């Protein structure tokens, strides 16, 4: 039987966590039971938080893959799905081979058991038989360099000793897939070099290694493939040098935007003046030359309202041979909080294989839907060589004092409800 080409396959994988509202009071079983009987119990569950929003990913067998992204982007959640710590909320996962993982430091260790006892327990958890663990016990202890401490309770270990023991166990169970989450950052220089040598040996043996790290130079130098996770989505997959370059440009651009943005100036009537800020990162072959909000008449949109239709018009210029361009549109609050984001790549919008020297991209919004307030429109043209971004501040006004951010299309209906015949007779009327 032919072995599968991919070590890990993920199709439309979503992982959500339930938000919980915790009341600021102490309760007892009796008081909670009384609330149930009285119908006063407050539901604790209040919606979902999506950590991963539809991951489609294939990790080839025998490759070393680096996963990068900002804190909170979903990297560690992705690893915990792969290792089986979490189950996906929806979607399909295929794991082809035995997995060993180095996630949270000391995870799976019992603090009151000795190092030797924890080796036995963790080896069995990772799929080895008792005899296999005992046969490799001496090699694991030797690699960990714990000496006489191996028979002491692990609660007496330092963080470096924890890491040595965890790494020794994980790399001696002969896994097909090794998952590492930043744990190599812990420990001294000697053991760090020793760990890298062990993982290099894994690479030579054709093992699959998946590494989450913020050390971008390690990804460039050591990985065969890089994956950029952003906001719970896979933003890019490709050669480490290209993905790391684009990621660094995105971080620099975000920092530049944060510094460049100032609150909108006010006109005499109190409205905000439209402000435009331009930022270019890297050697971007496409430049945004203009950003406008256009109304139904084709003119510059004035006095924007929630139910008004507008077009986001983006004029651009491109150098000859400019290919694989993505246009991204983001509506944000003044503090940079995203309210809505989309892109030509996400929506599979067909673009010319090669952009013309000058052109216009239009995003048609049949209905703006935003409530009264100040907003920021950010448009980015992104290529492998860099990105060009423009942001514009605009105002929305409304004569309805609604609260929130957006106005969904709606209408009210008030109508009488017929009274059933049985109810009118039951009210004591004459027969």
Image (cartoon, rainbow, N blue to C red):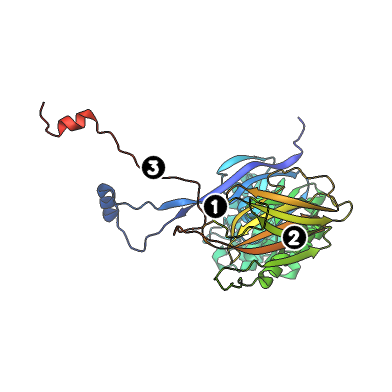
- Residue with the mark numbered 3: 413
Please report the residue visible at 54 percent of the width from the left and 65 percent of the height from the top.
155
Counting residues from the N terminus, which is met first, the one under dot 3 or under dot 1? 1
In the rendered image, the residue lying farthest to the top is 431
For label 2, the SS is strand
Check residue 62 in the rendering and tell me which mark sits there, or answer none. none
Check residue 290 in the rendering and tell me which mark sits there, or answer none. 2
Please report the residue visible at 57 percent of the width from the left and 49 percent of the height from the top.
367
Percent x, y for residue 403? 45, 59
Residue 174 visible in the picture: no
- Residue with the mark numbered 1: 369
Answer above or below: position of 192 versus 29: below
Percent x, y for residue 141? 68, 59
For label 1, the SS is loop
Percent x, y for residue 112? 51, 61
Q: Nearer the viewer, residue 243 or 288?
A: 288
Counting residues from the N terminus, which is met first, the one under dot 1 or under dot 2? 2
Corner quadrant of residue 283? bottom right
Callout 2 crowding tier (Cα within 10 Å): few <14, some 14–19, many ≥20: some
* Left or right of residue 100, residue 49 in this image: left
Please report the residue visible at 62 percent of the width from the left and 67 percent of the height from the top.
159
């Amino acid at each position: 039987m032919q072995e599968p080409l991919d070590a890990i396959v993920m199709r439309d994988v979503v992982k959500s966590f339930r938000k919980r509202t915790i009341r600021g009071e102490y309760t007892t079983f009796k008081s909670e039971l009384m609330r149930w009987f009285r119908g006063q119990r407050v539901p604790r569950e209040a919606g979902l938080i999506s950590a991963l929003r539809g991951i489609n990913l294939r990790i080839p067998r025998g490759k070393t893959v680096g996963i990068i992204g900002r804190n909170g982007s979903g990297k560690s959640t992705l690893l915990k799905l792969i290792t089986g710590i979490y189950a996906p909320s929806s979607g399909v996962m295929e794991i082809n081979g035995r997995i060993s993982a180095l996630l949270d430091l000391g995870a799976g260790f019992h603090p009151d058991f000795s190092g030797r006892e924890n080796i036995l327990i963790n080896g069995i958890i990772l799929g080895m038989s008792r005899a296999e663990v005992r046969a490799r016990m001496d090699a694991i202890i030797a690699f960990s360099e714990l000496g006489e401490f191996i028979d002491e309770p692990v609660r007496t270990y330092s963080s470096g000793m924890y890491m040595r023991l965890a790494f020794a166990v994980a790399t001696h169970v002969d896994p097909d897939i090794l998952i590492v989450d930043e744990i190599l950052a812990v420990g001294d220089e000697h053991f760090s070099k020793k760990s890298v040598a062990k993982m290099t040996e894994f690479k030579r043996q054709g093992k699959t290694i998946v590494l989450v790290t913020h050390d971008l130079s390690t990804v460039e130098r050591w990985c065969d493939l890089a994956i950029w996770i952003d906001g719970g989505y896979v933003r890019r997959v490709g050669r480490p040098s290209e993905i790391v370059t684009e990621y660094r440009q995105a971080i620099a651009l975000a920092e530049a935007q944060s510094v460049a943005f100032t609150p909108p100036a006010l006109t005499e009537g109190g409205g905000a003046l439209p402000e435009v800020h331009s930022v270019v990162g890297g050697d971007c072959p496409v430049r945004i030359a203009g950003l406008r909000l256009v109304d139904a008449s084709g003119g510059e949109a004035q006095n924007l309202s929630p139910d008004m239709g507008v077009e986001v018009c983006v004029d651009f210029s491109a150098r000859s041979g400019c290919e694989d361009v993505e246009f991204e549109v983001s509506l944000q609050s003044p503090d940079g909080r995203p309210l809505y984001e989309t892109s030509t790549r996400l929506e599979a919008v067909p673009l010319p294989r090669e952009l013309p020297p000058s052109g216009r991209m239009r995003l048609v919004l049949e209905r703006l839907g935003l409530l009264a307030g100040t907003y920021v429109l950010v448009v980015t043209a992104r290529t492998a060589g860099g990105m060009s971004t423009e942001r514009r501040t605009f105002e929305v006004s409304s004569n309805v004092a609604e609260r929130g951010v957006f106005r969904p299309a709606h209408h009210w209906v008030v109508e009488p409800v017929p009274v059933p015949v049985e109810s009118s007779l039951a009210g004591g009327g004459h027969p």
